[in-house]
């Protein structure tokens, strides 16, 4: 008689559910507890009273809302016309423009802020130096000042408008052409048709893009930390970070994080409602592609203007980074006579923290991609196949981190794991938990879409032959999902390399990653090393994204990532 191997599928799936609860519910639970407690642990509302009355906390909150509203409006004003031009007109290089917009998303926003600091700092900025050289203006005058509220809004918008552009352009691509054709046949002109047909149909997507831009600006940490703090003001995220300076004020940090968390949850819910609205319904099967509007003599001027807009997040910042990386003096333009590799030599051989930070970054990225991908695979399988009771709750928890800003998650993990029985602060494991949690929603969404393409009957056939759920997942479903597994691995790997907001709360001297090292080098003024490390991050990210793009990352995962990034 042959003994049947025990089926460990059910215990493993229950373990996955418990792990997910610990990753998300525990830190958020401690966040709520601390926000309503004083230093002695007694219940109080004093933290919130101070948050909404003390100018030291109220001003950053108001500033954050001003930045979020302004960035959202600016992104819509820029992205909506560009999306229409690319999707609905015969503008030259439209396909190239789309590719370059996607390329601009490779740049981490905090790297973009550093680049614009090199370009538009009042004294040393390259653009200001060029302006003074051309006009003969005195050395104390500047055309641009990036260290202002306007400068910060501009910088954040540069790396946020591509998300709105992609949503609008894709929406216009899918819009039925017959509706506009009918309007034209009834005598309406181009602009009348756009005003009465095209714009109303695209409005739900534009509103969803506005909410994404608002959330990006609301929760971002890197750009305000680079530009706002030197300018002498705080946003809510930088204020939360400052509360961890010695002596740490964890109760106030928790209370400051809670409004950010609640507002993000509400806005994400609104976004889902907006996206749930159908701008149009097609009856009768297929519909034709929309006709392109001919720009005539405006084709070249419009294409030039579009490329000038794209130079703001892409061409100018990378030119500044490359100039600084190869120049002995960051504030001077590099020439063949001054070209040097000294900054690279200093960064990778003399700067003692570079190699440990790079090692930590690559280890954390690989572990997060592997373990986080495996966790997302199991969760998506449980939800797609309804494998255990409570699978809907599990699916909710898998997407819940979307509503948790990175810096808020960092605060929650700090509060949860600085005490027994799991004292993880100061170790690489707390960063691993943070990175897996942040990247989980995108990975889960990618695998959930992939599972829908695999019919359950294939697994049922395996189980009828005596295989367990895990065995059928490994032998049957897994090989069919190979491309999605590799693409998701690359996707999470890239997200971890770019992450700053949670890492800046949780790192120690032994667990510093490259993003935090770049942030720290700002204080010492090693601009050349900052440029080299920034280009290193971009180079690694580009290579991995190229690999992932060839494996067709799902659109839903890309959309989720745009919401969660900062």
Image (tube, grey):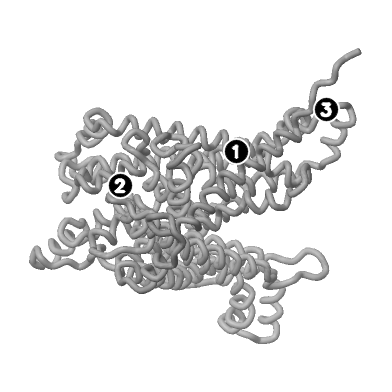
Q: Residue at x 49, y 37 (%)?
A: 422
Give the residue at mark 3.
467
Query: Marks 1 and 3, Cα distance to the nearest angstrom?
Result: 23 Å
Quadrant where the N terminus is found in the figure? top right
Image side of residue 212 versus residue 448, left or right: left
- Residue placed farthest to the bottom in the image? 187
Asked whether residue 101 is in view, the answer is no
Nearest to N terminus: mark 1 or mark 2: 1
Q: Residue at x 32, y 40 (%)?
A: 533
Q: Which quadrant would residue 481 be assigned to in this image?
A: top right
Q: Quadrant of the C terminus?
A: bottom left
Please tell me how crowded label 3 is: few (under 14), some (14-19), or many (20+) other residues with Cα within 10 Å.
Answer: some
In the rendered image, the vertical position of residue 297 relative to residue 109, given as above or below = below
Image check: 418 left or right of 481? left
| Among the two numbered marks 2 and 3 on one chain, the one whose residue lies closer to the N terminus | 3
Tell me residue 384's x, y (percent): 75, 46
Residue reaching furthest right? 1
Q: Which residue is mark 2?
A: 519
Residue placed under numbered mark 1 in the picture: 373
User: Picture coordinates of residue 284 (x, y %)?
Assistant: 83, 68
Q: Is residue 507 left or right of residue 460?
A: left
Give the crowd class for mark 2: few <14, some 14-19, many >=20 residues within 10 Å.
Answer: some
Q: Secondary structure at mark 2?
A: helix
Q: Secondary structure at mark 3?
A: loop
Q: Residues within 10 Å of mark 1 (few under 14, many from 20)?
A: many
Of helix, strand and loop, which one carries label 1? helix
For the residues bearing labels 2 and 3, Cβ distance under 8 angstroms: no
Kindly identify which numbered label has been placed on residue 96: none
């Amino acid at each position: 008689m042959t003994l049947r191997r025990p089926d460990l599928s059910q215990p493993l799936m229950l373990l996955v559910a418990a792990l997910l609860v610990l990753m998300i519910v525990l830190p958020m639970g401690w966040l709520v507890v601390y926000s309503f407690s004083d230093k002695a642990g007694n219940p109080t509302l004093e933290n919130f009273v101070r948050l909404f009355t003390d100018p030291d906390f109220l001003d950053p909150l108001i500033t954050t809302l001003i930045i979020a509203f302004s960035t959202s409006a600016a992104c819509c004003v820029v992205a909506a016309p560009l999306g229409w031009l690319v999707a609905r007109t015969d503008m030259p290089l439209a396909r190239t423009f789309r590719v370059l917009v996607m390329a601009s998303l490779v740049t981490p926003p905090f790297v973009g802020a550093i680049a614009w600091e090199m370009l538009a700092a009042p004294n040393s900025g390259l653009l200001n130096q060029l302006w003074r050289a051309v006009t003969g203006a005195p050395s104390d005058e500047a055309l641009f000042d990036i260290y202002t509220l306007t400068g910060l809004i501009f910088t954040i918008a540069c790396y946020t408008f591509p998300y709105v552009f992609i949503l609008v352009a894709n929406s216009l691509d899918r819009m039925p052409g017959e509706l506009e054709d009918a309007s034209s046949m009834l005598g309406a002109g181009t602009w009348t048709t756009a005003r009465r047909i095209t714009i109303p149909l695209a409005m739900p997507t534009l509103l969803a893009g506005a909410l994404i831009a608002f959330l990006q600006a609301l929760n971002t940490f890197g750009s305000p930390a680079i530009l706002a703090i030197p300018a002498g003001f705080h946003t809510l995220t930088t204020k939360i970070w400052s509360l961890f300076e010695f002596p740490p004020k964890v109760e106030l940090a928790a209370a400051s994080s809670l409004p950010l968390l609640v507002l993000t949850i509400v806005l994400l819910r609104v976004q889902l409602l907006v996206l749930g609205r159908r701008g149009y319904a097609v009856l009768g099967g297929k519909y034709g592609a929309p006709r392109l509007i001919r720009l005539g003599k405006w084709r070249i001027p419009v294409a030039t203007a579009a490329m000038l807009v794209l130079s703001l997040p892409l061409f100018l910042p990378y030119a500044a980074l490359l100039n600084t990386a190869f120049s002995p003096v960051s504030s001077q333009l590099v020439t063949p006579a001054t070209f040097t590799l000294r900054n690279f030599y200093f960064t990778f051989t003399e700067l003692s923290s570079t190699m440990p930070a790079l090692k930590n970054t690559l280890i954390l990225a690989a572990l997060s991609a592997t373990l986080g991908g495996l966790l997302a695979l199991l969760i998506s399988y449980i939800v797609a196949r309804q494998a255990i009771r409570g699978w809907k709750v599990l699916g909710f928890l898998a997407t819940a981190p979307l509503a948790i800003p990175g810096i808020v998650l960092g605060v929650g993990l700090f509060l949860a794991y600085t005490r027994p029985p799991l004292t993880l602060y100061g170790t690489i494991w707390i960063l691993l938990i943070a990175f897996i949690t942040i990247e989980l929603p995108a990975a889960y969404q990618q695998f959930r879409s992939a599972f829908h393409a695999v019919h359950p009957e294939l697994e049922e056939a395996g189980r009828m032959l005596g295989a367990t759920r895990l065995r059928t997942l490994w032998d049957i479903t897994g090989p069919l999902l190979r491309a999605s597994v590799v693409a998701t691995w690359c996707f999470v790997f890239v997200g971890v390399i770019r992450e700053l907001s949670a890492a800046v709360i949780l790192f120690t001297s032994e667990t510093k990653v490259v993003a935090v090292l770049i942030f720290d080098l700002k204080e010492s003024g090693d601009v050349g090393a900052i440029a080299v490390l920034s280009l290193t991050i971009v180079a690694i990210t580009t290579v991995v994204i190229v690999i992932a793009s060839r494996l067709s990352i799902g659109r839903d995962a890309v959309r989720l990532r745009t919401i969660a990034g900062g």
